[in-house]
Amino acid sequence: MYFNEDINDALPSNIPDFDVCCGGFPCQPFSVAGLKRGFEDTRGTLFFNIANIVREKINAGVPPKVLFLENVRGLKNHDKGNTLNVILATLEELGYNYSYCVLNAKYFGVPQNRERLFIIAWYKELINVDDFRFPLGLDSEGNTIYDKANLKNGTLPTKVSDIFEPDDSIDAKFTISDRIWEGHQKRKERNRQNGKGFGYSLFTSESTYTSTISARYWKDGSEILIDQTEKGLNPRILTPVEAGRLQGYRIIGKGWQHPECANNQNYNDSNLEYKIVVSNKEAYHQFGNSVAIPVIKVLAKEIVKQLLSQLKK
């Protein structure tokens, strides 16, 4: 087992050999992007750290077989598309074929509209495959959907209340104050008048999915507020347990508002149970930065099936 606190300080030679590199990194423009369009263009960014570890492993004769990279959807158009072009050119320079695709968690049984760009790359000298076929979602029976046209036939059904803890267990502190609620409404109206779409987002238990939870959710929860009009209350924010479940984590917490939800594909006992052992603020921050677990699970299975099972003998 190897742990390192800061990737900037990691020495590739100290990292045990591995088959699959899983990583995410921020959208950082490359200082000389558009010149070489390759590895050297990435110097000074976190992607460079990932690429450098991979390069050192290749030079040591133990190339990672697969690279499993994740980023925000905006990476596709960041710096007019130049950032992604340099990343892909770097992967080619390192000897990898690749495929990339934007996937949405709401098609994988998670009640959240969360789009992320995934790049799957495989080392050409070890894996003789021309393409990687991305799973785009799961149908109502849990079968993998590969054809975009089939998404319209329906995916695993979701409701926001799938993630709810029991009503009577929700602490009053999760209901936002009159002052905060008034501020949200004024800001949204002001933005509307200025032609901006920014503002709070309100959902009911029957909503099919929420907007994307972010690392700033702990500040005021404005991107995902739960309507409590029927109770005569201001909206509430998600509890930390609900925020985790929104990303597909199986967290028991105080149970489920609808007990049957404890047995769905994301939360039944075939899934690893997680416990929150940090403060509410840190839990929101971590869940907002997390990947959606069901998407990663399906992708991992496809990597094994389509790539790792095709290793050259």
Image (tube, rainbow, N blue to C red):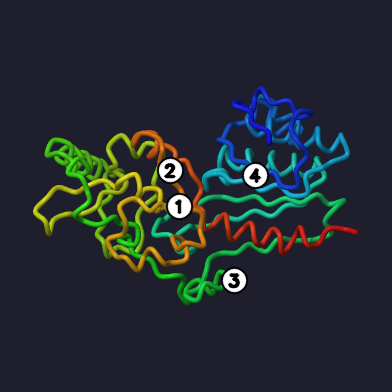
Give the number of the mark in front: 4 or 1: 1
Give the number of the mark in front: 1 or 3: 1
Residue at 72% x, 35% y is 51
Image coordinates for residue 60, horizontal then vertical, percent: 87, 34
For mark 2, does the 10 Å Cα neighbourhood hold few (<14), some (14 to 19), or many (20 or more) residues? many
Mark 4 or 1 closer to N-term?
4
For mark 1, does the 10 Å Cα neighbourhood hold few (<14), some (14 to 19), or many (20 or more) residues? many
Contact, mark 2 vs mark 1 (Cβ under 8 Å)? yes
Instruction: Say if 66 sits above or below 45 in the image.
Output: below
Q: Amino acid at mark 2?
A: Phe
Residue at 12% x, 50% y is 233
Q: Amino acid at mark 1?
A: Tyr
Mark 4 or 2 closer to N-term?
4
Give the number of the mark in front: 4 or 3: 4
Q: Which residue is mark 2?
A: 287
Q: Which residue is mark 1?
A: 249
Mark 4 or 3 closer to N-term?
4
Which label belongs to residue 22? 4
In which quadrant of the rendered image does the C terminus lie? bottom right
Give the number of the mark in front: 2 or 1: 1
Q: Amino acid at mark 3?
A: Asp
Q: Which residue is mark 3?
A: 147
Per the image, label 3 sits on a secondary structure element best described as loop
Residue 54: quarter of image: top right
